Amino acid sequence: MGERAQHEDGTFSWADLATTDPDGAKSFYSGLFGWDCEDVPVEGGTYTMCRLDGKAVAAIAGQREEERAQNVPPHWNNYITVRELDEQAPKVTELGGTLMLPPFDVMDVGRMAVAVDPTGAVFMLWQPKSSIGAELVNAPGALSWNEEATADVDGAKKFYAGLLGWTYDDMEMDGGITYSMIKNGDRMNGGIRSQAPQEQGMPAFWVPYFGVVSSDESSAQAAELGGQVIMPTTRIPAGAFSVIADPQGAVFLLFEGDFDD
């Protein structure tokens, strides 16, 4: 299993859920992944840490009122580790992105910023202090991949290459869709793809994958727990995946395959 004591710069390291129903979400994800949930009081609400075998894997929180007022649906936030956040954050705007929230401290656990890339996808930058983010990845029930769907793959790739030093291996998929495998140093670190026809007109977005033993079985379980199977299991050379919406509508993917430690 992929136990972690630190994450390298430029690595996806955390995901947390912004939802309209934290209690419902805790019930759903605990049932689906076996997460143990611990409510942690924070300023303005509760941040629920989700663990497997005592190791932090994700978190759940109530959606901010500003987002609800703007009709932003429940969603997963995707975090990327950087060691020098205050130096990195200004590069977001220099490279054509938007810094929604400049760097700020999150108690003693870390320092973060919220950004939007030039194609419209929101992401978080995380400088760890007492929390590295996920302590277990690339395992059943843990964060295993992160993916951007955008109408401008080349623009997104250029932005993140400039910001984080990512490189890419491109593949042509069925339907003329380009899938760019993100490389952070010599390790695979996610993907960037063209939006599918049914996604065109939507804002670009990042979405997390969580590992499972069986995509078919976990998809069926998600439906039994009140979620929706948006796309049933699809087989790929690396394994299989399915697209799920939780009962509040937040989208994520399940991944079945060989996990990279």
Image (cartoon, rainbow, N blue to C red):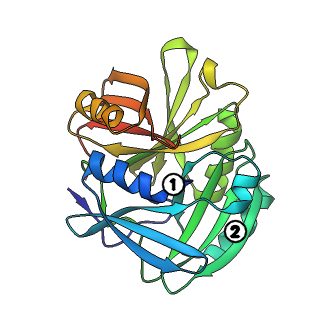
Front residue of this view, candidates 206 and 237: 206
**Which residue is identified by label 1?**
21
Front residue of this view, candidates 189 and 36: 36
Residue 232, relative to residue 217: is it above or below? above
Q: Position of residue 199 (x, y in %)?
A: 63, 26
Question: CA gap, disc 1 to disc 2?
Answer: 31 Å
Residue 9, relative to residue 259: is it above or below? below
User: Could you classify mark 2 by the number of other residues whose Cα lies within 10 Å: few (under 14), some (14-19), or many (20 or more)?
Assistant: many
Residue 260 in sight in this render: no
* Residue beneath the point at 36% across and 48% down: 28
Judge left or right: residue 69 versus residue 27: right
Q: Position of residue 211 (x, y in %)?
A: 30, 44
* Residue beneath the point at 31% across and 73% down: 5
Please count the marks in the image: 2
**Which residue is identified by label 2?**
89
Front residue of this view, candidates 221 and 163: 221
Q: Position of residue 242 (x, y in %)?
A: 38, 29
Q: Nearer the viewer, mark 1 or mark 2?
A: 1
User: Could you classify mark 1 by the number of other residues whose Cα lies within 10 Å: few (under 14), some (14-19), or many (20 or more)?
Assistant: some
Q: Locate the N terminus and report the quarter of the image it occupies.
A: bottom left
Judge left or right: residue 84 versus residue 51: right
* Residue beneath the point at 24% across and 47% down: 140
Q: Amino acid at mark 1?
A: Asp
Assign a secondary structure to mark 1.
loop
Assign a secondary structure to mark 2.
helix
Q: Amino acid at mark 2?
A: Ala
For the residues bearing labels 1 and 2, Cβ distance under 8 angstroms: no
Residue 79, relative to residue 224: is it above or below? below
Q: Quadrant of residue 131?
A: bottom left
Q: Position of residue 254 (x, y in %)?
A: 35, 37
Residue 194, relative to residue 61: is it above or below? above
